[in-house]
Image: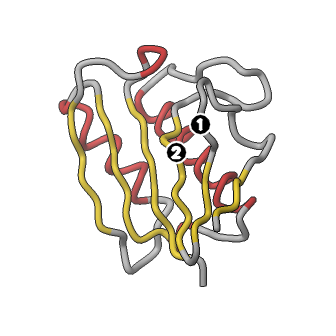
Amino acid sequence: MKKIISTTNAPAPIGPYSQAVQAGNFLFASGQVAINPESGELNIGTIEEETHQVMRNLKAVLLEAGLTFDNVVKSTIFLSDMGTFAQVNEIYGQYFTADFPARETVQVSVLPKNVNVEISVIAIVA
């Protein structure tokens, strides 16, 4: 059985998908980009600001499911430019305290709305 997770504290999906789906003891959160949920506008001033917005959006989805970044077991980071890896990695790391999740980071040619970073996560529901 699956449960759809949706919150107004993160951007509404820009296609036919859910912000997150809980299936059993796992939560699968869709990739988030740097859309400010209050204004609906992109927040892509610097790669650091963009990454913070992405992480705030993920946090909002996790919180709606009653979870935190401590529940995340896997993440995927998509970058439009691997040259921004160090900056994204630094901001990303500020949202985790210990027992870091498994992860891969890949460069892609284009991301939705021409953003520079998109991150998705899988979390365990304790």
Secondary structure type for disc 2: strand
Q: Which of the two labelled residues, at mark 2 and mark 1, occupies the earlier sequence position?
A: 1
Secondary structure type for disc 1: loop
Q: Which residue is pictured at 61% across the width and 56% down the height?
A: 21
Q: Closer to the camera, 59 or 85?
A: 59
In the figure, 77 relative to 70: above or below? above
Colouring used for the render: secondary structure
Which residue matches tag 2?
A: 30
Q: Closer to the camera, 34 or 113?
A: 113
Residue type pointed to by label 1: Tyr
Is residue 70 visible to us here?
no
Q: Which residue is pictured at 68% across the width and 29% down the height?
A: 36
Q: Is residue 4 left or right of residue 96?
A: right
Q: Is residue 9 left or right of residue 123?
A: right
Q: Quadrant of the N terminus?
A: bottom right
Which residue matches tag 1?
A: 17
**x then y, percent, for residue 41:** 67, 17
Q: Is residue 11 left or right of residue 120?
A: right
In the figure, 125 relative to 33: above or below? below
Q: Which residue is pictured at 23% across the width and 27% down the height?
A: 108
In the figure, 34 relative to 94: above or below? above
Q: Which residue is pictured at 60% across the width and 85% down the height?
A: 126
**x then y, percent, for residue 59:** 62, 55
Residue type pointed to by label 2: Ser
| Distance from Cα at disc 2 to Cα at disc 1 | 8 Å
| Label 2–label 1 contact, CB within 8 A | yes
Checking the image for residue 34, the label placed there is none
**x then y, percent, for residue 34:** 55, 30
In the figure, 107 relative to 29: above or below? above
**x then y, percent, for residue 117:** 39, 32
* Eye-nearest disc, 2 or 1: 1
